Image: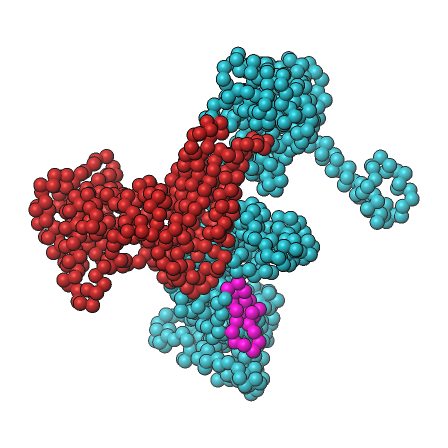
Amino acid sequence: MFKFVSGFCAAAADTPNMERHCTSVTRTPLNSVRVQRRSKSKSYRQSIRSCLGAASRLVLTPALTARRLNTSRKAPKSLDITEKVNPEQLSLLVKKEWQLSYVTPLYQFRHTQLKSYSRQLSAFIAAEKQRGLAVEVEGTHGSFRVSFGVVQGMSEADDDAETVLVQIYSKPLFAVKDEPPRAVWSGWLTCINGSPDYLRSLPKDFTCMPLFCSSGADGLSSLVKSWFQLTFDCCFGPLEISHTSLQWLVALWTNCHTESAIKHLKMMWTVPAASPLKVTYTVNGPDAWQLWSSVRKERHDGSNKEEEEEEDSIDIEEVMRFMQDLKSHFYRHFRTDLSAGSLDQVATALGSAKSSGRIKIANSKYMITTLTLLTECALLKMPI
Amino acid sequence: MATKLNLSEQPDSETSSLNDQTVSSRSNNRSLRVAEKERRKIEAEDPFVLALKYFTDVEAGTPVTGNDEVEKHLVLVEKVAYNRGLSPEAISNMLEFAMSLRMGTTLCARVLKCLIPATAVPQEAVVRAVVWLGVGKIPITTQVLFIKWVLTVFDMIDAKDQLRAIYGFIFSFLTDESLCPYICHLLYLLTRKESVRVFRVRKLLELQSKLGRQPFLLHLLSLYKVFCPELVTLSIPSRMRSGFRNHNSPWKSVLIGVQKRNGSQVASSIAPSASMVRDKTNSRKRKYRHLEIPALNCVVNKPAQTGTSSCRKLVPVVQLNSFAQLLENMHHIELPAQMGSLLGSSLALQYLDFVQDESALLRLNFWLGYALHEELLFCSDGGASQNSEEAVQFLNKLLSTQHFLQEGFSSSEAFLYKFLNVWDGSLFRPEILGLLSNIPVIPSSQIGCLLFEPLKQLFFTSSLFFKCGLMECLNNMLLKWLTWHSVYALEDDLDISLNSHTSINMTLSGFKDSVMELVLFVGRIASVGLQLEGCHSLLLSFILDFYETVCDTFLKYGLPLVLMPPPGVFYPALFATDPVNVDRLAYIMYRFKVNLTSAKSQEKITQQAFHISRQTFQEFNNYVVVMANCLLNYKMFHPGMGVQLGEELLLKSNVPQYWASYDLTRHPAFMSYAIDFHQKCWPGRKDMDLNSIKHPKPWSWYLEYLFTQGYDGLKQFCQGNISRQQTAGDGQGDSVSSKQR
């Protein structure tokens, strides 16, 4: 397996050179810019999605509509979320790598009952841990303590349910008295800018928090999931971050560069060669931004004034252009066409995302944009 | 009455009871008695029963080496054990045989290894076996094996009280170093507060000083400490590897297999299933667990009850055992925690069907949709083929549920629309087609892209077998739609509620449009399909099945819609080489006629009736003319008919009497009948002249002869048309007027 690291990016001396490349690339006519091949799973997903839009009427209420990834979204704006959200709670959400899942709507979940849920879940975990021991052992219940809490302010639209954070602390069975319990697992359920049509179509008994992020031992994750399943009659499924979503993240994060330096844009590709190639492609932050702004600029030059008004929106075409330019540049240097491969991983100083469904948000300022995208992905996975 | 009496009698009292009974009941008795005897005999001859008997009765000290009999019996017991598991009795007998060492120590270990309980393990047997341990002749490895076995089946032991009673006795085995870890585990499972005694704590501490701080001792001690903290002053490390090691390896996999085979009723009725489920949870294949139907559980987290509901006690679905109970508690039933669990219980489904609770249905649909999506759509790594058996079971369960409720779930419908786009047409074909036939009516504006596009592609690229399957499926779909219509259509109101669970209403004309789209679609693909498959008679038969439904929409289902088959279906059926299909076509045309005439007469009576287009009548008449001319009137290629060929061309073909080449005597499907008839009619004649059948008398005999061969469709068709032709003049409207031309 080879590992390419784009040379010029590591040595920033080449910047003007790159600029030249970029301009030459961006001048290529738009219609020639096309992703030639797609990975199998990609086209498969797409066909599912394409039928989803049409299949909207099946659902009980016609409102569960056009479920495909938005083709245009607002450019992320630096948002001092700390004004809305308690920074202490926020610090629990950032700088940790989360494993993503989607969750079907929760039945009879009450934000007011969190205390009792904490008790129930601790009891459930204790019971599961004791299973097979056949005898009820008193006193061991305390080994795990669960706390449920609302992350106040972590919601955007009116229809979004408040984010719920679950933490599990371990208090070892025969612990020394003063030892403080450690958080061994944490997870949160959220819905940021969820499709209002979908959310409104659900009966009152249901609370939709489609995105579930967890971090901690797998055993505990599955215990927590099965408790939720039992208690709120919901289902958990793995949420991968699709190729398209990763590309979106590349663009959205790069777009933030002026406000908050992304330092570098790192992308990992898998190219299906005879022996599959893993390509790590790193671009310096300023370079990436320059390329991105040229893509943005071109659009604005070419477009009429009406569109100027929506300056802060980013279209999928721009994202694809940007990606194509990055790929062309890579091809120029290494004669390897990345469009044949798939993007597996994206990382910048703002965060990182893996196609397997792991995400890390390093900067809380832009987390709303990222979570909006992920909420959308999770809603796409809903069975009905 | 007599039979009842007799059933309870012992066979020994046979003669005495026989005397005072009537002759009739006596003979009845005898047959029962014979049957009973037979059963016993069969049972007695059952090699497994014999084998068990052998092990129960065998004398101590019987040699093992060279003893074929014991080998034979043991192999049989092993086979049964690994397949179905052993009954409690069998466990009891075999355990006694093994532990008593009647045939030496080698057999003992072997028997222990095959002691797979099918349902439960009798406590007495375990207690007796523990007592045998005390005799001390059993080699230590075998003793360990035995304790491991007890640990494995611990949850299946039917009661624990006697075992607890011999707690002290079991405790005494701790002194043996190799047994100690296992005995500790067993004691851990049996310990109660009253079993914790000072001398036991002391003994354990003593052992600990001898053996070191072994985890098994620590675990037992920590449990003692939990019960009686004052007795155990020892500080126990805060971090301990939790639990004892699992010692159940030799039996575990077999046990799971046996339980699976014996069905869930066993698994759910006894405790160990819990640990089994847990094993599954922890297994690597966790992601495939979504096909498991959740267990019926009560709601843990009850919503705060209001004053009115609290005085009425809610009955959970789990507690219902019979339909009568369901009826009794109809108005205060509590739905289970997970709606998916209803899929396994017909009683609960009946309730669900009754309540029409939107939230409940939505929960069920979320779960079902999730399971289907995860299993068949999202796992693109070929996972479906790995556990196809499980998936087939699941899908079949879903199908039978839908049949039970007589309607499809919206989540399975939504799933199908997506799945059809990626389906290869062979994965779970019968199940998917079954599900497909259950989907409710789709509005005509969407039916094309949701259903027809993917189906068309599948149809034209798949085998003949698939084509037939799809035709059957579409026929079932149409049948269900029509049935819905006839059930839900309100008499005056044109609005019909399509699916009792959804709020989607459809106007009658909307429904008619959808049905029409479906019928036209089938007509199109059937025409092309027949060409592709060379008018295969099997496919043709499935297509005619569909049209048998279509031709009766008005009379059978009250839907004012009559649609003719396209020429691509009609002509291949008319010229089919097998008589059955021709006969069915004749039947279909006959039914069309009946439907059309009754529609027409109704139109006259009720005034406000619907409009059947002129074109339909024309098409029908045209078909009837062609058919009659072809089969009966030897006027094939008559000008003005559907099939036209230039006169010169026909002459050029050198076919003699081409105009008669498809009449009932020469039609390829009926030729053999004509020949047969000819031979029967004129047995002496050497040269065959089929034309001689066409004289009026033999012709009517010939038709008679055909009708006696079971061609009822043909009979109805002929009688419906010919008789009128003969009594010409009573023109009965468009539908039959063709004959007079």
* Frontmost residue, A183 versus B169: A183
Q: At x 50% / y 49%, what residue is drawn? A: A113
Q: At x 89% / y 41%, what residue is drawn? A: B17
* Frontmost residue, A56 versus A142: A142
Answer with left or right where residue B56 lies relative to residue B184: right
Tell me how many marks there are. 0
* Frontmost residue, B588 versus A95: A95
Report if residue B500 lies within the magenta region.
yes
* Colour-to-chain, cyan: B
Compared to B563, does B734 lie above or below?
Answer: below
Q: At x 37% / y 47%, what residue is drawn? A: A239
Answer with left or right where residue A86 lies relative to residue A8: right
Q: At x 60% / y 71%, what residue is drawn? A: B704
* Residue B220: image location, x then y, percent: 56, 23
* Frontmost residue, B557 versus B157: B157
Which tint is chain A?
red
Residue A25 visible in the picture? yes
Q: Quadrant of residue B403?
A: bottom right
* Residue B58: image location, x then y, percent: 70, 20
Answer with left or right where residue A326 lies relative to residue A185: left
* Residue B438: image location, x then y, percent: 50, 60
Report if residue B456 lies within the magenta region.
no
Q: What's the coloring here? A: by chain
Q: Quadrant of residue B39?
A: top right
Q: Which residues are magenta?
A: B480-502
Q: Extreme front residue here?
A: A178
Residue B385 visible in the picture? no
* Residue B513: image location, x then y, percent: 45, 72
Compared to B188, does A356 lie above or below?
Answer: below
